[in-house]
Amino acid sequence: MSRTRELIELSERRSAHNYHPLPVVVREARGAWVTDVEGRRYLDCLAGYSSLNFGHGNPKILQAAQEQLQRVTLTSRAFFHDQFAAFCQGLADLCGKDMVLPMNTGAEAVETAIKVARKWGYEVKGVAPGQANIVVMEDNFHGRTTTIVSFSTDPDARDGFGPATPGFTIVKYGSAEAIREAIDDNTVAVLIEPIQGEAGVLVPPSGYLREVREICTEANVLLIADEIQSGLGRTGDTFACDHEGVVPDMYVLGKALGGGVVPVSAVAADAGVLGVIRPGQHGSTFGGNPLACAVGNAVIELLGTGEYQAAARQLGTILHERLRALIGPVGQGGHGVVAVRGRGLWAGVDIDPSLGTGRQVCEALMRRGVLVKDTHGSTIRFAPPLVISEEDLNWAVDQLVAVLAELAEPAEPAER
Ligand SMILES: *Cc1c(COP(=O)(O)O)cnc(C)c1O
């Protein structure tokens, strides 16, 4: 039995089956490339769902982590440590906000935003106790806690985990009118992904976010942007909201903030919002720990150069141009791609379901040395590290073209 099969079988036997991974067992990685236990190399076009925007083993991030490992890694928030101030100031400045509240995972940061918004609603807006509601979007993905899955519209994410947390109103994504209608006197926030990642990289209509911003301002409702996946360079700007010149009241950040090394998340907001949280009301043993802050500081420094945003913009243009050229039925000028969405180095590609499932496309790409992940049936998502070279990016698209040709070729139906 191969080392790969052996490790997969043991993993499947001894771990809960809450994921359905591709059959590749990674041993090491650098930049945009990973190597498996058999020594095979793959181009990572998923980048840990945008956790690895700066590449595997980014030298600046590794150096910051290694130096911090030697000094102090954990203090708890019972004490201050010397990385904390710089992290909070750096991240607040990056967001153009007064202050931040650091946590670890994305879901924890979303939970933080929900708690802050509710408390702001009661203390600042004057909502009656226990009556606050938050407007959320259909097909959202904000994490896996019991409260967050309470307002998921994905049956797999939600069903079987009730009773649901009340206080959320779900509206159609992309319709500002639907948000306007859903807001009432007890609404404290609108929680939105500026681009819906897990839903298939759905980009809302142009002008939508600006309109949502106006509606929230008029109604005295906080606009909370979940930029956990869309933020920190991915779309060609620091935040996806920047493309519409929109500034939310609260940014929710995670994934790439940890540099692919440790989980680091945070919310950023002005003092009038985050100031509602006082000692003892919210926290996390690991949130804002020295190692996390040192890594976060390196990430903030990398984003400060603007290089990664520029790379995502330039390479994103190439990626989208090349993917769009594949749209159309096979044999009629196309390659079996139905639609391409996204922004920057982030693309959702809908494959003609008659060619195969998204999973089949991902498995075929894996055999050709490209790692991507399917979502919702026949969509595959490209989100390579922003350090990918133009040559490698083109090569990845070439592999997709080859896979689509294979799947369209009736002489080779038994490729699996
Ligand atoms: C990944 C993600 C989350 C959850 O982050 P975790 O670190 O997995 O808890 C929340 N919101 C969005 C938009 C995400 O992409």
Image (spheres, rainbow, N blue to C red):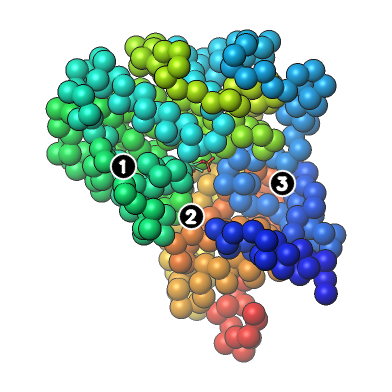
Instruction: Mark 1 vs mark 2: give the one in front.
Output: 1
Q: Residue at x 59, y 17 (%)?
A: 77
Q: Earlier in the sequence, mark 3 or mark 1?
A: 3
Q: Residue at x 65, y 26 (%)?
A: 292
Instruction: Give the structural element (helix, strand or loop) at label 2.
Output: strand
Task: Check disc 3: other Cα within 10 Å, few if <14, some if 14-19, many if 20+.
Answer: many
> What amino acid is found at the position of numbered circle 3 in the picture?
Ala
Q: Residue at x 68, y 52 (%)?
A: 44
Label drawn at residue 71: none
In the picture, residue 244 is in which quadrant?
Answer: top left
> What amino acid is found at the position of numbered circle 1 in the picture?
Thr
Label drawn at residue 32: 3
Q: Position of residue 212 (x, y in %)?
A: 26, 33
Instruction: Mark 3 vs mark 1: give the one in front.
Output: 1
* Image quarter of the C terminus: bottom right
> What amino acid is found at the position of numbered circle 2 in the picture?
Gly
Question: What distance separates the C-alpha of mark 3 from that of mark 1?
Answer: 40 Å
Q: Position of residue 7 (x, y in %)?
A: 76, 63
Query: Circle 1 sits on which residue?
Result: 165
Q: Is residue 4 left or right of residue 213?
A: right
Q: Position of residue 365 (x, y in %)?
A: 65, 66
Query: Circle 2 sits on which residue?
Result: 348
Q: Earlier in the sequence, mark 3 or mark 2?
A: 3
Task: Check disc 1: other Cα within 10 Å, few if <14, some if 14-19, many if 20+.
Answer: few
